[in-house]
Image: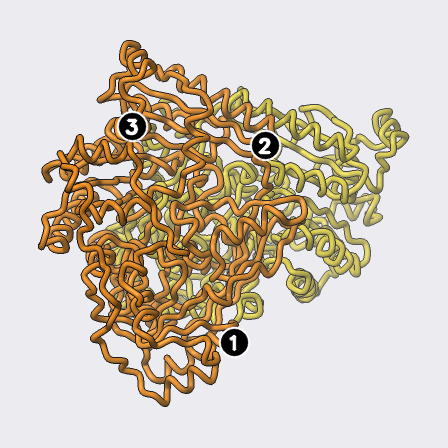
Chain colours: A orange, B yellow
Amino acid sequence: MKTYRDILKWGDKRETAIDEGTINVIKDKFGYTESELKQKHLYGNQEVKLEHQIKLDKAILNQFTEIVGTENIETDDFSRAVHSYGKYYADLLKLRKGDVPTPPDAVIYPRSENDIIKVLEICNKKRIAITPFGGQSSVTRGVETPKGGISLDLTKHLNKVLEVNEVNSTSTVQAGMFGPAFEDYLNNFGAKYSCGHFPQSFEYSTVGGWVAAKGAGQASTGYGKIEHMVLSMKVVTPSGIIDTKTYPASAQGWDLHQTFIGSEGTLGIITEVTMKIRKYRPENTSHASFIFKNFDSAVKAMRTVMQSGIGVPHLFRISDPEETEIAFKTKNFEGTFADKFLNVMGYKSTERCLMFVAVEGSKSYTNQVLSSIKKITKKNKAFSLGASPTKRWLEQRYSSAYLRDPLMDLGIMTDTLETAVVWDKLIPIWTAVREYLKTREKTVVMVHISHVYENGANLYFTFLSPMKKGDELNEYTEYHKGIVDTIQKNNGSLSHHHGVGRTLAPWMENELGKESLNLMQAIKDHLDPNGIMNPGNTLGLKP
Amino acid sequence: MKTYRDILKWGDKRETAIDEGTINVIKDKFGYTESELKQKHLYGNQEVKLEHQIKLDKAILNQFTEIVGTENIETDDFSRAVHSYGKYYADLLKLRKGDVPTPPDAVIYPRSENDIIKVLEICNKKRIAITPFGGQSSVTRGVETPKGGISLDLTKHLNKVLEVNEVNSTSTVQAGMFGPAFEDYLNNFGAKYSCGHFPQSFEYSTVGGWVAAKGAGQASTGYGKIEHMVLSMKVVTPSGIIDTKTYPASAQGWDLHQTFIGSEGTLGIITEVTMKIRKYRPENTSHASFIFKNFDSAVKAMRTVMQSGIGVPHLFRISDPEETEIAFKTKNFEGTFADKFLNVMGYKSTERCLMFVAVEGSKSYTNQVLSSIKKITKKNKAFSLGASPTKRWLEQRYSSAYLRDPLMDLGIMTDTLETAVVWDKLIPIWTAVREYLKTREKTVVMVHISHVYENGANLYFTFLSPMKKGDELNEYTEYHKGIVDTIQKNNGSLSHHHGVGRTLAPWMENELGKESLNLMQAIKDHLDPNGIMNPGNTLGLKP
């Protein structure tokens, strides 16, 4: 029997138990009793059974089957339910409740670009919706199928490295390849390489997803976001195939790559990408961590680093005071001798901020950058905590996402939102969004900066708050709306790297202006005249 | 009396005499006699008189005059002739011959964005062509007006810095501001800044032109091309105003900035841009120069530098053997003791290659990068020539362009073409294009690399060859076609930073593929449904 719970589980049934430190935080912050700590709220243990009837007719399904073979098309309830949602908090709530009103009619696993062309041709002719599907870690309702149709899952077959070019320092890779497989391949190829792109979703995201949703990795301060890494690509659209050439840069009209990076499946299916790769030399990496007296001085130090022409670190993070406090609590640091020492030194529990740094590259570069950073942090009254906190953080860098399901079992609402701002808007938006989040009683709000630029940075908000049981979805939706409104009012971008999907679509016109959204729509209408590509308001586009 | 010669002159009547070193090269390579060295071939000394009749009717001209004032509209022959061409070799030939068949009907100098909106509205309603005009240094026939209409010159009024934000490290600047004025403003503002963008055309190019034609500066290896510097912009299009917000990065759909960067006036008028700026600290800059035994080893060293994670230099150049030879000849280095010494050491006159390096940033960064580069060049058997050759090159960095007119006076055809390639195609395309260029008798071909990336670099070809008198334009056009064909056949981009204009338009479909060009056309048709923006095949677009 396959249950909704099975869909919640990550990858190969991965579930993480909540660690003792986090349990203590929950007790402390929410006043949970022992029995509350054992609850399995909306556990989702019921069998997956869809009420939704497949709307595609048999003859068409047969055509698809002829193209890809019976083993590469699925119409059973479980497969369709799996392909109905990503990992957005509201998705998880709906799955727990068994609420799947608009699953795809069929899931197709194309074996090749040629399969994709043929499937798309039929969809276009018959006006069947088609939505590309990768690692399923979308937190923006980006893979939902409100118009049913086909969920096109690229992970089963289009998951190979096609070329590593060591002279050019590039790799051509199929869109359905998962991050770890790609990185592993590169780490073991020739002189050893790295993709340099490690989003929080790394373990359950694909190269195509990175590009489609315009993601950023944890080393983005050094290597850039995905839009800075893609050199060429192939996209199958209803109007034809876009197939670009690989140049280090060019000036032959405007850059069409940037029309597809961030297109979130609305324009076509990205089938392969040629990306920059970098030397893999973990032995050269310098690590450091610092504690600052307050958020202001940590932000100032970070900005100084980015604007001083000293080179850039690859990983560069600050946790705000509350995130720092929680980090210390969960690591059982609170009350230790070291904690007391820091407090005495003026690094007070409620104000201090952690900074993590890792620099990659040649030994001379990593040494130089790190020593320059140390000088800047010292000037801003930071205290060095050495390399190990950053190393430890890196070891468990992807794990926090897996806590979400066990937290929801305990009736805890938890979600993350992110935005990008220029430096002079950073403290005001941090203050405003925190203030809004705190209007909800007993809410833990953790904020960090994790992608840094000369001109500004992102802010990443994580919140935990006990659910209002019975009204979980509505209360979340309303709360979420207030957060995004506050971000937009305070000069933050709608997203820095999560993307827009359907979650943020309602804010797009206000964000971009009518003319820009019209331009996006015109591009969409040209490439996808029948509106079959990931339809249903993705990015604020019609239909 | 105003002559065509006055149009050829740069800026405030700047004309450069040919230096003795170059004269010697001309004697040596082309066998010029003393009397040939005194010729003034196609000197263009005739008065500017246009046969072309203004096609706009009086009533409409009056409407324009009402908008901008009489002092901001010109319809005299000289002004219209000035606004008929950029600085493409064929443009100069035509001007010298007094061949101006399609000048604009009027030149308008808008005082404000509001003026632009009003002028554009009339143009759109009446189907009058409108072509933005900046520093006039286009080498791609980008400012020509084959359909007449309005040349919209932004340099007279829209030439101010609107904001320098020292916290965000950004500046908002109007499109018609010239490079030197912008840089000078930044150098003297607050803690002192630099725009970091120094194209060869710097002295006669505008911010709007940089963005419209997707330029690159001489420090691009460190600071990136213009498309890496623009954070937001305002564009007045026939369909409305695109006005984007300033973020350090974002993921809110695809990046529309990149639709306007490189649009070459075909989509709208860029009125202002917010750009990254950098600290101005020339005192920190490290300079070095090296001589390599051959082009292969110089290229290998350059590639190693870019792929080693040592940081990047800002200026990074190699001259190929022939360019190195000419540089040494013109500097009267040939035959000196130092020259003999280098030859004895194995740096042979016909094979050796010069490399220039300058690194900007903090002192520790510039030291570290330079010392890492020195190690890499040493491994590749280069000999260090110290800082001064690079410093001397920087002092006269913009001057070589001003030689073109005096060279043409001597009946010498001279032009430059450039392309970007990935590393493993670099030596083959360098070989192939040189081979093609050398099919023309007595042709000097100088090649350098001046914009460098992890994944490849540009190649910049300069050639000099005696004209076939009487058939100057045809012989050039045919020769030029062969060069571009050879570039395209050998995996080079049509352009790395000159842009496309009308010169390279015929190659665009083959370059991008039909689908990509169709997409560009659809974008054009949406924003400019009446086809009034810089019409006449710019970028290969209709009409």
Look at mark 1 in the image and give the residue it sits on. Answer: A114
Picture residue at 42% right of the left edge, 69% below the top:
B521
Q: Nearer the viewer, residue B169 or A460?
A: A460
Q: Nearer the viewer, residue A231 or A9?
A: A9
Q: Element under label 2?
A: helix
Of badges 1 and 2, nearer the viewer stands 2
Q: Element under label 1?
A: helix
x, y percentage for residue B368? 60, 24
x, y percentage for residue A294? 27, 21
| Dot label at residue A324 | 3
Picture residue at 31% right of the left edge, 22% below the top:
A333
Name which residue type carries label 1: Asn
Q: Using the image, determine if residue B42 lies above or below residue B448.
A: below
Nearer the N terminus, badge 2 or badge 3? 2
Name which residue type carries label 3: Thr
The answer to whether one can see residue B75 in this image is no
x, y percentage for residue B70? 28, 51
Q: Using the image, determine if residue B201 lies above or below residue A142.
A: above
Q: CA distance from mark 3 to mark 1?
A: 51 Å
The picture quadrant where one finds residue A400 is top left
The answer to whether one can see residue A10 in this image is yes
Look at mark 2 in the image and give the residue it sits on. Answer: A283
Q: Disc 2: which chain?
A: A
Q: Are marks 1 and 2 in contact (CB under 8 Å)?
A: no
Q: Disc 3: which chain?
A: A
Q: CA distance from mark 2 to mark 3?
A: 28 Å
| Dot label at residue B367 | none
Instruction: Count neighbours of disc 2 (C-alpha within 10 A) and say few if under 14, some if 14 to 19, many if 20 or more.
Output: few
